[in-house]
Image (spheres, rainbow, N blue to C red):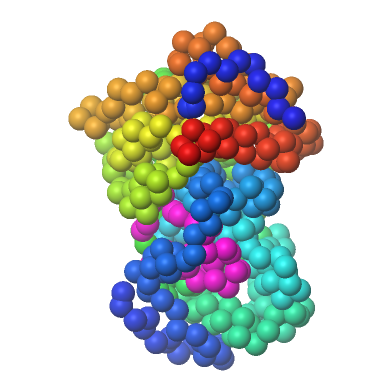
Amino acid sequence: MADTYSLIGGFYSKPSPPLPPFFLKTPKLPLHFPSKSMAAHFHCSSNPRPSQPSLLVFSGGTAFNGVVEELKKLTVRVAHVLPVSDDGGSTAEIVRVLGGPAVGDIRSRCLRLADESTSEALAVRRLLGHRLPINPQQAKSEWYKILEGEHSLWEGVSKPYRETIRAFLAYFQNEILRRPNESFCFSNGSIGNFFFAGARIFFQSLDAAIFLFSRVSDIPAESLVLPVISTNDRLTLGCELWDGTIIRGQNEISHPTNIIGPVDKGRSSVPALPSRIKRVFYMSSEGTNSLHEVFPTVNQAVLDQLSNVDCIVYAMGSLFTSLCPSLVLLGIGEIISSRSCPKVLLLNGSHDRETSGFSASSFVTAITDALNRTYGNSHNCLRNLPSQYINTLLVPKDGEIPIDIQSLSSQGIFDVVIVNSIHDPKVGTIFDPVSLINALGNVVSRYMRTKD
């Protein structure tokens, strides 16, 4: 059960090209996969479930994953909006050698949404969720066993799925072999990331790759996984600190490491930032300072969903590197501020490198500044109030972020709900998934009653 501090007022293509010859024997595709435009048509023509509320969730690829399964019990009509600027882990190696956007967060969310109702669905999910060993030689050896169809991970995967998945894994391998001057390191590599990268390069479309991955993993048609920027180009995130320092790269901002391997996104011993973060922005792939700032265009599908959903959610996670990269884009703040639906912030339970010393109102200020683009190009700045972007705060019980009620009230936020929490040894206090989704469901149902 959730306890309420106070409640005042309302809520508030063309056809795909043929596969080129591979260095490895590759099965033919058993299906013809649709182009980007056809993928969009597929989602639009699916049977809606009007009895279920529709949500749009801004998040990264880690923290919110833990509640995705429970969220399905409330609704499957969810648009998951994810950044494509993560340059850590095995994603970094794919981007280094093959270029293109980072797909790790998208792959991670797709796997969480994947069907688990049959033994084959579980086998496909197990295959695409597999990571190779840390040791580079062992990783390369296991990769070839998977590629050649000889690994035990293929057990339970039927011939149509096997041929489809192997075709794109082989295409990914072929792209690596075409770059003899680059030595690809398979250490800790994600098979799902490799499949995703192969599909994206083959179709020359990130949207088509997501569509294919969604069909292979049997994600409900009403559950959308949307890159906030639909691009085939590499995107680099930068941040400006209050002392003027510029940091290049998402991983350098949040979890700096020189090790190729799993990125620890929990409570780690990374050094503190020399100053608080002022803003995040996109920069050219070779850029080193704010003079190299670029302004990518937001995915139109994200704006379309924002205009129509019943609830907008800012998920817990890395504030500046998971949430803000989606919020700073032109058009996002304009639409959110115009909506009268619930706009819910799921507050983190612990501080991290990006939010050391933050209170609840500090999170609200950072999100407001990102959506207003306060410290960006002065011609594109908005001047909306915090309450136009956030009207409800869900807070994990016993979290370490101070809940400064008076400051929140001065920001126009009065609906603050305490939600049961659990302790995670890696990251500290986190929401209890069942309690969180119940609390979110109560917020949404309260709004839905006012609509009827």
Task: Find residue 238 and report its horizontal and vertical position in percent.
Answer: 41, 38
Q: Residue at x 69, y 71 (%)?
A: 121
Residue in front for this viewpoint, 80 or 274: 80
Q: Looking at the picture, does residue 5 appear above or below residue 152?
A: above
- Quadrant containing the N terminus is top right
Say which quarter of the image contains residue 406.
top right
For this orientation, the residue located farthest to the top is 406
One can see residue 265 in this view: no
Q: Residue at x 49, y 33 (%)?
A: 450
Q: Is residue 215 left or right of residue 244?
A: right
Q: Is residue 108 visible?
A: yes
Left or right, residue 102 beside residue 333: right
The residue at the point 20 percent across, 30 percent down is 379
The quadrant where residue 348 appears: top right
> Residue 42: horizontal and vertical position, in percent?
43, 69
Q: Residue at x 49, y 79 (%)?
A: 171
Percent position of residue 333, x then y: 35, 34
> Would you place residue 30 above or below residue 316 in this image?
below
Residue situated furthest front in the rendering: 452
- What number of labels is visible? 0
Q: Is residue 219 magenta?
A: yes
Q: Nearer the viewer, residue 297 or 412?
A: 412
Q: Is residue 85 magenta?
A: no
What segment is highlighted magenta in the picture? 204-231
| Residue 143 or residue 313, whichever sits in front | 313
Figure check: 415 above or below 57: above
Residue 138, percent from left and from top: 72, 69
Front one among 160 and 11: 11
User: Would residue 294 appear left or right of 192 to someone viewing this image?
Assistant: left
Taking the view exactly as shown, the residue that stands out farthest to the left is: 379
